Image (tube, rainbow, N blue to C red):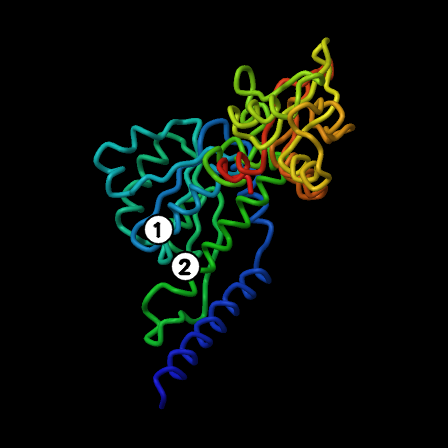
Amino acid sequence: MDKTNSFLDSAKQVFAIEQKAIQELSTTLGVEFSEACQKILDCQGKVVVIGMGKSGHIGNKMAATLASTGTPAFFVHPAEASHGDLGMIGEQDIIIALSNSGETHEVTALLPVIKRRGIPLVSITGNPNSQLAKASQVHLTVSVKQEACPHNLAPTASTTAVLVLADAIAVSLLEARGFTADDFALSHPGGSLGKKLLLMVDDLMHSGENFPAVSETVTVKEALLEMTNKRLGMTAVVNANKQLLGIFTDGDLRRSLEKGIDLISQPIGELMTKNCTTVNAGTLASEAVLIMQTKSINALIVLNEQNQPIGALNMHDMLKAGIV
């Protein structure tokens, strides 16, 4: 058989087996799931996830997903827990233990201490009659009929099913807490979503001495010097009271040249674009991008509460900040 087809056949077989495992899990999900979610929601401390081997890898992901969606959580390696890391866990916390067999020694070795300290325990195993399941206040069974591994040995379908269940728990808690996109952004300030939901035009605009602005009476030549010095490809045009009258851009310059206008003596007030598009301070940078894209412009002037121009930004600023 052609190796390419063989690889594809293997992949499709894996997809079919793991999809079936997830579908069967959804049909067996019962009241225990709600009990587990409520217990976690009621927790006054943190969620501590433990697991060994492949279950540990899934546990790490589970803790990370919970933490980023409004449920404070962290992962503790069960072997390290037996050698001091149990001190990281307090009586106000709750433990979620993952073990396919429910008999993983490194995990079950912790049960006496967990019980003695009165720490609530939720377990996810493939064996409801296991030692770990019986020791838990709430147990969730994730049992698959077949692993994707052809020898039915390597954890594949079972770990996928647990991962999906962990995501279901995280999302259910997210919704119960009323966790919003803004909340998500606060825990992801370095990500692209965080930037889109957190960065304001105030954070990116050129202000103070870096803000290009000229009087309506200056010539185009003088305005061009201001544009060159501030390097934004535009300048605001203001009156004697610093009120915004319009904007003069590279595009306005090209149009003036096409008309053969004398740029040496012509006042900028006669060539500027009046009623230019502006945004208020405090506007999300992502909203400013949308405005620029909708109106096919490359720059915006930022106004304060008194409708006075206090800054400017262009599409390059948005690109540099990772908003676009």
Q: CA distance from mark 1 to mark 2?
A: 9 Å
Crowd tier of the residue under label 2, counting other residues whose Cα lies within 10 Å: few below 14, some 14–19, many 20 or above: many
Q: Secondary structure at mark 2?
A: helix
Residue type for callout 2: Thr
Q: Nearer the viewer, residue 60 or 309?
A: 309
Instruction: Looking at this view, name the residue that lies furthest to the right.
Output: 275
In the rendered structure, the answer to whether residue 283 lies left or right of residue 70 reads right
Image location (x, y in percent) of residue 194 = 53, 36
> Looking at the picture, how far across and down is residue 163, in whole percent?
46, 54
Q: Quadrant of residue 11?
A: bottom left
Q: Position of residue 76 (x, y in %)?
A: 32, 39
Name which residue type carries label 1: His
Question: Which mark is first along the chain, 2 or 1?
Answer: 1
Horizontal side of 105 relative to 308 (left or right) equals: left
Q: Nearer the viewer, residue 140 or 182?
A: 182
Residue ID at (29%, 42%): 77
In the current view of this chain or complex, which residue is farthest to the left? 83
Residue at the spot 26% in from the left edge and 47% down from the top edge? 106
Displayed quadrant of residue 75: top left
Q: Disc 1 vs disc 2: Cβ atoms closer than 8 Å?
A: yes
Label placed on residue 159? 2
Q: Secondary structure at mark 1?
A: helix
Of residues 36 and 56, the one drawn nearer to the viewer in this rendering: 56
Per the image, the residue denoted by label 1 is 57
Q: Residue at x 43, y 31 (%)?
A: 93
